[in-house]
Image: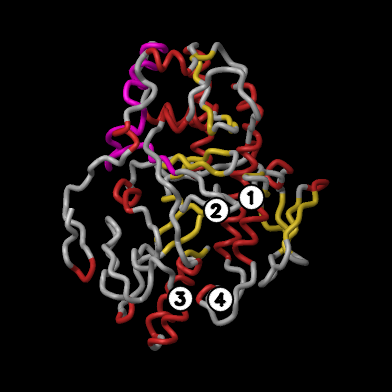
């Protein structure tokens, strides 16, 4: 991903152009998220079967959450609100989430388990929503709820594309869409702007800068590139096609992966990913292997999330006994995603030189910047009562 260390132009920041952002979730305990849903259900069963003292040790209380914490239900999630100390029901159905920039995992959507769950994100999470996520030096787009932590552990802001469910009220600075429409001679939607952000964003010491262009043709090229980047990142979600390498090339397993692989590496000469002592996957282009976010290789981080040792006796240690077939399928898809994104990187670099800039001064003159304070706060989206602690309706 492109990074610049200094800007010589007056370039607006993503923080001002998409004003409403939310800090990352703070799980408080790692065992509530896992690469497979079955492990989460097994962890929940182990917790709810344990006696009082053992349950407390397994849960790992923090200042914000313990077995007797009274918290409201997460919006749009059916998990219970009774005290966990006496919980004996089935595990809430795990949901797919985005961990880091490209690692799709599973989370138990229970407010009693998560220190800071960011209910405002859950309220606007639906089939229309996309999340623009700051991940190290990169910005990624996901239809999954992002946990929001970068590979280096630093928090990255999460920006929903829409402020209300159903794809309503774009999260754009008031007047921005109208100014861009006047500049380019056609309507500019929220999806267009998200595509431009992904294609053009530059990481700077001041923040994530979004250079805007005055030329309609350059804007159109950038939006087209951004839509392709988003299509690859979504991996077939939202009705799109699943990513495929051009020319009929696709990574496949040449030699079966071992049950408990301990290492991952790459042989550039024959584009082979080596997993453990015997596992072989190819072709894996160098661009996929070298793809980094936050200074760390994405494939190495993904592998470590699934193989790093867990402390015995903890719920984190409840995991698959061997390497599941589903992880192999996910690995092949991730290789494809990273390879395609790496191939598109030269187009992103060329976009930085495309057309005259529309400086932040022009946005200030038009009254778009600075955005009003109200645009940085979540919209009121409550059209139904939400369940509070112990089954009572929350006071809103």
Residue at image mark 3: 43
Distance between mark 1 and mark 3 Cα atoms: 27 Å
| On screen, residue 77 above or below 150 | below
Indicate which disc, 3 or 4, sits on the residue closer to the N terminus.
Answer: 3
Gap in angstroms between the C-alphas marked 4 and 2: 20 Å
- Over which residues does the magenta segment extend? 158-184
Quadrant in which the N terminus is drawn = top right
- Judge from the rendering whether residue 121 lies leftward or rightward of residue 72; answer left or right: right
Tags 1 and 2 in contact by the CB under 8 Å rule? yes
Mark 2, residue position? 103
Name the element at disc 3: helix
Residue bearing the label numbered 1: 298
The extreme front residue here reads: 63
Q: Residue at x 40, y 62 (%)?
A: 115
Q: Residue at x 49, y 19 (%)?
A: 212
Magenta-colored stretch includes residue 92: no
Residue 17: x %, y % from top left: 42, 28
């Amino acid at each position: 991903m492109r990074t610049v260390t200094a800007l010589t132009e007056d370039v607006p920041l993503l923080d001002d152009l998409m004003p409403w952002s939310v800090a990352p979730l703070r799980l408080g305990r790692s065992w509530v998220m896992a690469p497979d849903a079955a492990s989460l259900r097994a962890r929940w069963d182990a917790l709810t079967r344990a006696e009082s003292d053992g349950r407390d040790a397994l849960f790992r209380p923090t200042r914000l959450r313990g077995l007797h914490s009274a918290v409201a239900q997460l919006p749009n999630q059916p998990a219970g609100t009774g005290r966990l100390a006496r919980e004996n029901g089935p595990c809430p159905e795990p949901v797919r989430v985005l961990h880091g920039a490209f690692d799709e995992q599973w989370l138990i959507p229970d407010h009693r388990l998560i220190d800071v769950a960011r209910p405002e994100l859950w309220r606007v999470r639906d089939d229309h929503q996309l999340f623009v996520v700051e991940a190290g030096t990169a910005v990624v787009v996901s239809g999954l709820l992002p946990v929001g932590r970068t590979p280096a552990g630093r928090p990255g802001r999460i920006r929903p594309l829409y402020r209300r469910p159903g794809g309503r009220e774009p999260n754009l600075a008031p007047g921005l869409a109208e100014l861009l429409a006047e500049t380019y001679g056609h309507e500019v939607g929220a999806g267009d702007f998200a595509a431009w952000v992904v294609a053009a964003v530059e990481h700077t010491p001041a923040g994530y800068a979004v250079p805007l262009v005055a030329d309609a043709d350059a804007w159109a090229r950038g939006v087209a590139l951004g839509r392709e980047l988003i299509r690859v990142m979504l991996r077939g979600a939202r009705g799109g096609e699943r990513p495929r390498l051009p020319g009929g090339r696709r990574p496949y397993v040449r030699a079966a992966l071992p049950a408990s692989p301990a290492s991952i590496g790459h042989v550039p000469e024959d584009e082979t990913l080596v997993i453990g002592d015997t596992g072989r996957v190819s072709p894996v282009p160098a661009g996929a292997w070298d793809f980094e976010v936050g200074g760390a290789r994405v494939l190495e981080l993904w592998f470590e999330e699934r193989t790093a040792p867990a402390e015995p006796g903890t719920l984190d240690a409840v995991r698959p006994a061997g390497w599941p077939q589903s992880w192999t399928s996910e690995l092949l898809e991730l290789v494809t995603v990273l390879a395609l994104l790496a191939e598109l990187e030269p187009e992103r670099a060329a976009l930085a030189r495309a057309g005259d800039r529309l400086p932040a001064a022009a946005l200030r003159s038009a009254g778009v910047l600075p955005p009003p304070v109200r645009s940085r706060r979540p919209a009121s989206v409550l059209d139904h009562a939400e369940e509070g602690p112990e089954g009572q309706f929350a006071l809103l």
